[in-house]
Amino acid sequence: MTLAPLRRARGFSLLELAIVMVVIGLVVAGMLAGRALITQSEIKTVVGDFNSLMASYFSYRDRYAAEPGDDAKASGRWANARDGNGDGRISGTYDEAAPTSANLGSGSFTIDGTAGESLNFWWHLRLAGLVREAPGAASIATQPQNAFAGLIGVQTGGAGLQGLTMCQANLPGNIAEAVEGQLDDMKPSTGHFRGVRQSQNPQPLATATPVIYYEGRSDVAYVVCRAP
C-alpha cells in the first residue's frame, strides 16, 4: 500500500502579514480622519449658530431700537405680533416650553415681566425675517435646535452671566471645550462664555452643575451660554 505524501500547511508569509497590517492601518486612519472632520464640522456649526444669533439680535436692535421679545411696539409693525413689556430685559428662561400655534393669541401664553419674552424673542426675530422659520408644525415662538437636538434659547442672566444670555444645550463635552476655545478664554467660569453640566434635556440653568468641561468626553452633555 502506498501512502500519500504529507502536505505541509502553508501559513501567511511575512510579506502577506505586512500587507494586511498596512491595509488595516489605512482603514483605521481613514475612520479617525473622517471622525475628526465630522467633529470639526459640528464645532463650526455651534460657533456659527452663536454668531448668527448674535448678528440677528443686533440687527433687530439697530432696526427697531428695541430688544426682540421685549419690544413693546411689535404689534404696530406686524398684525400677528405680541408685544413685550418694554422694560429692557428678556423675561422667562431659554428652556421655556414653547406654545402651540393654537394658543399663541390666548391667555394661556403669557408675555410679561416674569415669563414669555424669551419665546417672544423668536417670534419677533422671525417676523423681522432675521432667523429661519420654525420647523414643521412648531409655532413661530418655538426655539430652534442645534445639531445635537439641544435648544438654542435666550434669557436674562444665568450660568454666571449678566444681561442677555444666549444658550445652547446638549453639547458633548469635547464640543463644548472646543467652542469655548474659539470664543473665549478657555475658563468656563470667567469671561463672556460659560459652561455648565446638564443632567436632563432641556436643562434649566438654575439646576445645572457649574463644572469644568475640559474632559474631552463626548458622553457628558453641557449647556453653554454666551453674553453679547
Image: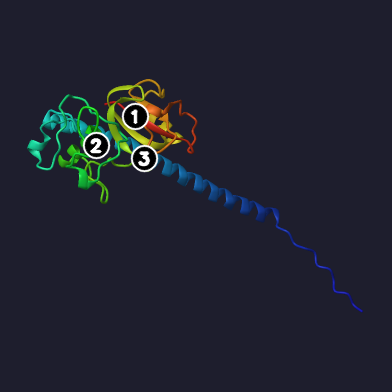
Drawn side of residue 8 relative to residue 121, left or right = right
Q: Name the outermost residue toward the bottom.
A: 1
Q: Nearer the viewer, residue 75 or 227?
A: 75
Residue 205 image point, x, y percent? 36, 29
Task: Give the residue displayed 32% in from the left and 32% down from the top.
Answer: 167
Residue located farthest toward the front when viewing the structure as drawn: 107
66 lies above or below 138: above
Q: Nearer the viewer, residue 180 or 115?
A: 115
Packing grade of label 1 (10 A; few <14, some 14-19, many >=20) is: many
Q: Amino acid at mark 3?
A: Gly
Q: Secondary structure at mark 3?
A: loop
Question: Is the residue marked by circle 3 packed among few (<14), some (14-19), or many (20+) residues within 10 Å?
Answer: many
- Of the pair 215 and 111, the residue shown nearer to us: 111
Report x, y in % for residue 202. Answer: 37, 37
* Numbered-mark total: 3
Q: Which mark is residue 225?
A: 1
Q: Residue 118, located in which quarter of the rendered image? A: top left
| Residue 181 image-quadrant placement | top left
Disc number lying in front (2 or 1): 2
Q: Earlier in the sequence, mark 3 or mark 1?
A: 3
In three-dimensional space, the C-alpha distance between marks 2 and 3, rounded to whole angstroms, equals 15 Å
Nearer to me, 132 or 122: 122
Q: Which residue is mark 2?
A: 119
Q: Earlier in the sequence, mark 2 or mark 1?
A: 2
Kindly identify which numbered label has been placed on residue 150.
Answer: 3
Q: Is residue 131 left or right of residue 168?
A: left
Q: Is residue 32 left or right of residue 104?
A: right
Q: Is residue 154 above or below residue 144?
A: above
Provide residue 105's location: percent of width, then percent of height. Answer: 16, 42
Q: What amino acid is at disc 2?
A: Leu
